[in-house]
Amino acid sequence: MDSNAYFKIRINSIIPEKPLTFDLYLKINDQLITYVRAGDRLEKEKILALQARDSGSHFLVKESDRKAFKTFVHEQMISSDLNVRQKAQLLRDSSMTLVEEIFEHPDVNVALDNSRPIIHQFVEFMDAEPEAMGHLISLSGHDFYTFNHSLDVGIYSLGLAQALGFTKQELDEMGIAALFHDIGKRQVNLDILCKKGSLTDSEWAQMQKHPQFGLVILNQNKNVSDAVKAACFEHHESWAGNGYPQNLTAAEIHPFARIVAITDTYDAMTTQRSYNVPMKPFEAVTMMKEKLAGRYDPEFLKAMHSVLFKLKAS
Ligand SMILES: [Fe+2]
Ligand SMILES: [Fe+2]
């Protein structure tokens, strides 16, 4: 099987009882079988059973049907058949496997191009539905897929940037910046990335190079803005100094990078990754405000608190 000829989708991207506009394949033991033909539909019970088994990452759609899949998702997003919560779930799940391409696709430029319309869809959704961000945030951080980090940091960053008054155009850029903030980790040895327990000094030194590695990758694409590059290169800088790689302080750090610094840490604290016990949202923000205060833009951190607090109130 030519893996470039197909892309993965989550089973949650399929709306029950809606005729599909593309063939859906299932991969079992490296064999591809046609699971649902275009024009046929999946019953609700079947989808629930598949969700329970969580075989989402084994569903594939032909690359030549990518447009049909996007249109299928888009039509559900603007239809009145789904409520805001269901739309948030659909958007998040249909985006997730596409976001995996950021780390898996051999050509980062293709991943960048494919990501732009996805981010735009998030921004449009946030614009059309005032409660969209609350639902998107509450869906974040609750499952265990490896690549969620970038998408969740993307969602939190859009929420924070929206609260800070960014325009729709700036939000489009912010979303891309957050999605690609850790792109340099493509260059870090997988054993180091997945290591449980603490890193040795030399492993840590390699890990800390991911902002530089990322900048090199993003510099190869002429459509990447300076703001997106700054978020990648400066997201481990610290408001009070002592960050890396440039040891910048306060306003020297690009606002996009100041946002990602907050949302990146918040996501790491609140999500069940391989070995840590996740913190509750408010525990995490309180810890960032009290124990880690010097690291973040205080105004931005306040805004992050309000984004999450609004969410809790809604
Ligand atoms: Fe990072
Ligand atoms: Fe990160």
Image (cartoon, rainbow, N blue to C red):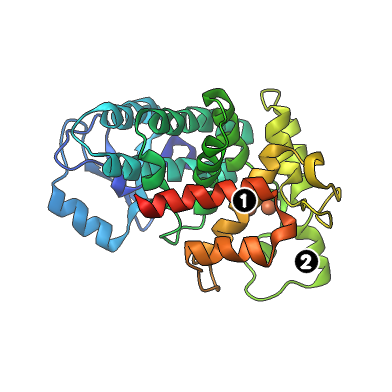
Q: Which mark is residue 274?
A: none
Q: Is residue 312 above or below residue 114?
A: below
What residue is at 48 percent from the left and 61 percent from the top?
281
State the image coordinates of residue 183 (x, y, percent, origin top left).
66, 45
Give the quadrant of residue 289: bottom right
Left or right: where 58 falls relative to 103: left
Left or right: where 194 falls relative to 40: right
Nearer mark to the viewer, of 2 and 1: 1
Amino acid carrying label 2: it is Glu
Q: Which mark is residue 301?
A: 1
Q: Is residue 70 above or below residue 184?
A: above
State the image coordinates of residue 37 (x, y, percent, origin top left).
21, 36
Quarter of the rendering occupied by the N terminus: top left
Give the quadrant of residue 96: top left
Residue at the limit of the structure toward the bottom, as seen here: 197
Can you identify the residue that label 2 sits on? Answer: 203
Marks 2 and 1 close (CB-CB < 8 Å): no
Numbered disc 1: secondary structure: helix
What residue is at 27 percent from the left and 43 percent from the top?
86
Residue closer to the observer: 122 or 116? 122
Q: CA distance from mark 2 to mark 1?
A: 30 Å
Answer whether residue 314 is visible to the viewer in this image: yes
State the image coordinates of residue 30 (x, y, percent, origin top left).
39, 54
